């Protein structure tokens, strides 16, 4: 509604401070039009507005300026009021959720108190009774057990084709699911690090002393209940391990709900475990209070119902009553309760792998929390809170993430019905599994990689994969290292070959070799989820040629990369780094052939034996000796392990199959070795019985150590190692490499940021890196602000006197961890001709904060 408005002008010079200006509706409308286009017009624009609009001719430019100031102020106040209302609604809804959770916990406490009192009464009664009474109690308990078992035939008598029988199963599943979601049917324990609040994911709990594994999540989603139900029902859109969901039958229930018979296939997380499938009944209905509920349970011989489709490639898992309850929230949005309760038949996998199938934490992260996060992500995308670059729509970016995950899962599992078949090894070693797929047309299906696959993808696709077991290496730290230090494990020639597969004329098959020309990488952020647990990015690898003759082939390579699980504070989550070469055009339907790494943590196991060192193990050998390894413990009697799965895919033509297979097998084998070296470098060292990494023995290293030792003695008058200075270069190198203080060398350049060029073992431990990746670390990124200032103030002294002592401070490792040190000594390293070579740093008594 348009009304007359009055504005008091500001008491600027030349204006009457008591003067009021009354605007007509036409004037306000004209000003509003300009405000829509330009909320903050310049002085020239305001004068132009008065000249072009006759209805504003009686208003002075400074009065126009005041009107825009007031208009911007009102707009800001309106936005702030709307934001506060949104926060208030979230707080009210979260308060309601917490009160309900508190009531549920009170009921659980009362139930436990009652059980405790009942148990004490039973013990007291049993101590004062005779044997005859004991026998009588046994008879009574036997009668009760017989009565309980008498219910089973009732399930078996249900007619599979009778909707009334299925509805009976559905109603039982609904009642049991609701008792888990809002009651005390399961002893829930809140997950560590999941604090409830208006900006948190919600309340996340896992089961304790429960048959199978179970997880529960409660949270707020700013979407209407039916929209949330639609999102969560589409399991393939948010559950990355879901291969397919087939609805084989839909039966309307008499109360307005629906009953669906569903067959679901799940990918296996590693190469040495069978995939799982479920045969379930899903029941969707509205409750009397307006809530919408979807519950699901397996159909077995115990529950009754029709038999599911058999599959030889899968192990049939059981879903206990699970689902989600969606309640409308005052002021809009929904309160969502999600419960997942499954039995994954852990006994069907080797003992060392069982923690993957027995962990409620992993179930919570991969299924329960993933569902809630996905719904919240779409809600924020719908409201416009999420901004994306590159002009890509959120749905398109999500599709790219799903393509990468699905393609990697497909490579890891290698299902026969997808066209995969094993390829034998010519060298007799079976540490690397190689499979080929001669039906690349399947990659063009919409359920896999997009609408079309380029013809240049050749005759087929080859995948080389392996799994390994790591000790005492956090998954988040390892994946973050692999992401940030690609040159530590990747081979540029293989990257070039993979990228060339997108073109009609691929390169010749290169030989994967360590120490090849490394490629600098530039990471270009593309999107990230609201909770920042997953990043989608484009990686540009700057091209390098192997020799001057290959300069024509040198060009930049682009990878689409998905990184997830790099937050060390997430409990039970797996970390993953998956990437695929893309063309410079990067179309929405770009074909993707993903490769990468997945690191899944295993549960901590308390063991009676002493501590063993940090070790990397080949998983195949681990499976053979799982009982022996299960008795070995890490520090403090805990065995922290993680399973690393590696899979790399390549295309080939018929005449290049053997050479590509040889290259892929050799490349993955070299990556396994690289990960083993990286794991030893970044694993915690205190208490380790592992021998340190061997020192480099190149002539350059021997010469550098001689220069470091001699320069320290010349400048300070003391010997660096406290020994005779006439010792051999080999001895000096061993002494420096095993020195207890961190010794690092830094480039001395006038027009470039100094970078580290060499470090001893302790220095690599402090920076949490390796010799290869060390050259990517800059000095100014390592020292904190006070350390940089101290170095700058002492730099003239260092150049004139040759050395200086820096006070205690804090620096940062390549993994982002803070490191404190008591003192740092810096000195010039001189070459044989007394010219400056580099700066050497020695950090004394350092430790992680």
Image: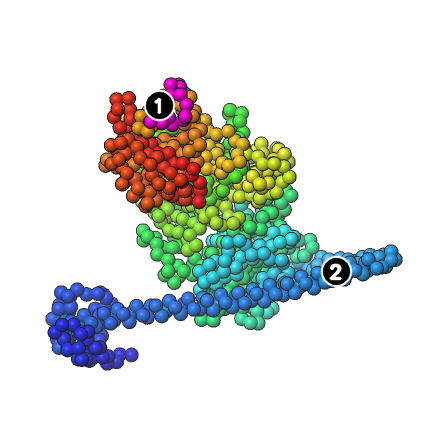
From this view, report whether residue 76 is shown above or below residue 269: below
Tell me, for residue 518, which label it has, or none: none
Residue 355 is inside the magenta segment? no
Q: Mark 2 sits on what residue? A: 120
Of callouts 2 and 1, which one flags the residue occurring earlier in the amino acid sequence? 2
Left or right: residue 435 compared with residue 808:
right
Q: Is residue 718 magenta?
A: yes
Which one is in front, 507 or 174? 174
Q: Secondary structure at mark 2?
A: helix
Residue 706 has which mark?
1
Q: Residue furthest front?
A: 717
Number of residues whose C-alpha sits closer than 10 Å to that of mark 2, classed few (under 14), some (14–19) or many (20 or more): few
Image side of residue 390 versus residue 574, left or right? left
Q: Mark yes or no: residue 56 visible.
A: yes
Q: Name the residue: 54% across, 62% down.
A: 337
Instruction: Classify residue 126 by image quadrant.
Output: bottom right
Boundaries of the magenta span: 717-730
Indicate the position of residue 810 as horizontal and vertical percent values. Answer: 38, 43
Query: Residue sitting at 61 percent across and 65 percent down?
Result: 106
Residue 556's x, y, as percent? 31, 37
Q: Nearer the viewer, residue 417 or 763?
A: 763
- Residue at 32% in and 45% down: 786
Asked which quadrant contains residue 353, the reply is top right
> Which element is circle 1 on?
helix
Q: Is residue 660 left or right of residue 17?
A: right
Q: Position of residue 657 (x, y in %)?
A: 44, 30
């Amino acid at each position: 509604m348009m009304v007359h408005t009055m504005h008091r002008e500001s008491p600027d010079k030349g204006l009457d401070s008591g003067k009021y200006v009354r605007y007509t509706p036409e004037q306000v409308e004209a000003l509003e039009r300009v405000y829509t286009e330009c909320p903050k017009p310049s002085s020239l624009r305001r004068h132009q507005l008065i000249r072009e609009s006759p209805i504003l001719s009686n208003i002075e430019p400074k009065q126009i300026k005041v009107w825009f100031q007031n208009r911007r102020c009102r707009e800001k106040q309106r936005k702030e009021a709307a934001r506060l209302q949104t926060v208030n609604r979230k707080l009210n809804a979260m308060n309601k959720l917490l009160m309900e959770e508190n009531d549920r916990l009170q009921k659980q406490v009362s139930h436990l108190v009652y059980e405790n009192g009942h148990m004490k009464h039973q013990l007291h009664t049993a101590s004062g009774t005779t044997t005859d009474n004991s026998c009588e109690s046994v008879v009574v308990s036997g009668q009760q057990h017989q009565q309980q078992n008498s219910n089973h035939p009732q399930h078996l008598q249900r007619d599979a084709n009778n909707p009334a029988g299925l509805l009976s199963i559905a109603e039982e599943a609904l009642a049991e699911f609701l008792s888990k979601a809002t009651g005390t049917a399961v002893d829930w324990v809140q997950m560590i690090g999941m604090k409830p609040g208006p900006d948190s994911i919600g309340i996340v709990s896992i089961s304790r002393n429960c048959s199978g594994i179970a997880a529960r999540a409660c949270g707020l989603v700013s979407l209407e209940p039916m929209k949330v139900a639609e999102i969560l029902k589409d399991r393939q859109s948010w559950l990355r391990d879901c291969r397919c969901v087939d609805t084989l039958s839909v039966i309307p229930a008499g109360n307005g709900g629906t009953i669906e018979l569903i067959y679901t296939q799940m990918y296996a997380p590693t190469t040495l475990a069978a995939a799982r499938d479920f045969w379930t009944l899903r029941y969707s209905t509205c409750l009397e209070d307006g809530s919408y509920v979807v519950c699901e349970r397996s159909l077995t011989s115990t529950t009754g119902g029709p038999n599911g489709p058999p599959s030889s490639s899968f192990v049939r898992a059981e879903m206990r009553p699970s689902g989600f309850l969606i309640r409308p929230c005052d002021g809009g949005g929904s309160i969502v309760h999600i419960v997942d309760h499954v039995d994954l038949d852990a006994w069907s996998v080797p003992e060392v792998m069982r923690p993957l199938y027995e962990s409620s934490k992993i179930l919570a992260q991969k299924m329960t929390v993933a569902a809630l996060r996905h719904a919240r992500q779409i809600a924020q995308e719908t409201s416009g809170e999420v901004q994306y670059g590159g002009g890509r729509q959120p749905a398109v970016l999500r599709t790219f993430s799903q393509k990468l995950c699905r393609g990697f899962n497909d490579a890891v599992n290698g299902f026969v019905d997808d066209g995969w078949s094993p390829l034998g090894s010519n060298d007799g070693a079976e540490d690397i599994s190689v499979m080929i797929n001669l039906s690349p047309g399947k990659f063009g299906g919409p359920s896999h990689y997009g609408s079309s696959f380029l013809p240049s993808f050749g005759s087929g696709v080859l995948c080389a994969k392996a799994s390994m077991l790591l000790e005492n290496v956090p998954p988040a730290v390892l994946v973050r290292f692999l992401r940030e230090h690609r040159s530590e494990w990747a081979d540029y020639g293989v990257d070039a070959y993979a990228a060339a597969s997108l073109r009609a004329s691929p390169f010749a098959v290169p030989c994967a070799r360590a120490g090849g020309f490394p490629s600098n990488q530039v990471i270009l952020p593309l999107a990230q989820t609201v909770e920042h647990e997953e990043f989608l990015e484009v990686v540009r690898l700057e091209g390098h040629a192997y020799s001057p003759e290959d300069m024509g082939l040198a060009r930049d390579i682009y990878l689409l990369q998905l990184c997830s699980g790099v937050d060390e504070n997430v409990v039970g989550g797996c970390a993953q780094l998956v990437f695929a070469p893309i063309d410079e055009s990067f179309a929405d339907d770009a074909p993707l052939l993903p490769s990468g790494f997945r690191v899944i943590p295993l549960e901590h196991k308390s063991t009676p034996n002493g501590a063993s060192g940090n070790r990397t193990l080949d998983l195949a050998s681990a499976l053979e000796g799982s009982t022996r390894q299960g008795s070995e413990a890490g520090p403090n009697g805990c065995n922290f392990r993680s399973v690393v799965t590696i899979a790399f895919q390549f295309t080939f033509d018929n005449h290049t199959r053997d050479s590509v297979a040889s290259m892929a097998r050799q490349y993955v084998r070299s990556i396994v070795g690289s990960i083993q070296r990286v794991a030893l470098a970044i694993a915690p060292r205190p208490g380790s019985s592992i021998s340190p990494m061997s020192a480099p023995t190149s002539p350059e290293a021997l010469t550098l150590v001689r220069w470091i030792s001699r320069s320290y003695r010349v400048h300070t008058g003391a010997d660096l190692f406290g020994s005779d200075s006439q010792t051999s270069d080999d001895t000096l190198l061993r002494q420096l490499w095993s020195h207890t203080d961190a010794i690092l060398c830094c480039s001395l350049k006038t027009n470039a940021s100094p970078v580290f060029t060499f470090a001893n073992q302790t220095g690599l431990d402090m920076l949490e890196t390796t010799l290869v990746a060390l050259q990517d670390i800059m000095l100014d990124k390592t020292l904190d602000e006070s350390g940089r200032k101290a170095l700058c103030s002492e730099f003239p002294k260092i150049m004139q006197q040759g050395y200086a002592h820096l006070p205690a401070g804090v620096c940062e490792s390549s993994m982002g961890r803070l490191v404190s040190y008591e003192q740092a000594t810096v000195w010039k390293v001189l070459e044989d001709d007394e010219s400056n070579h580099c700066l050497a740093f020695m950090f004394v008594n350092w430790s992680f904060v």
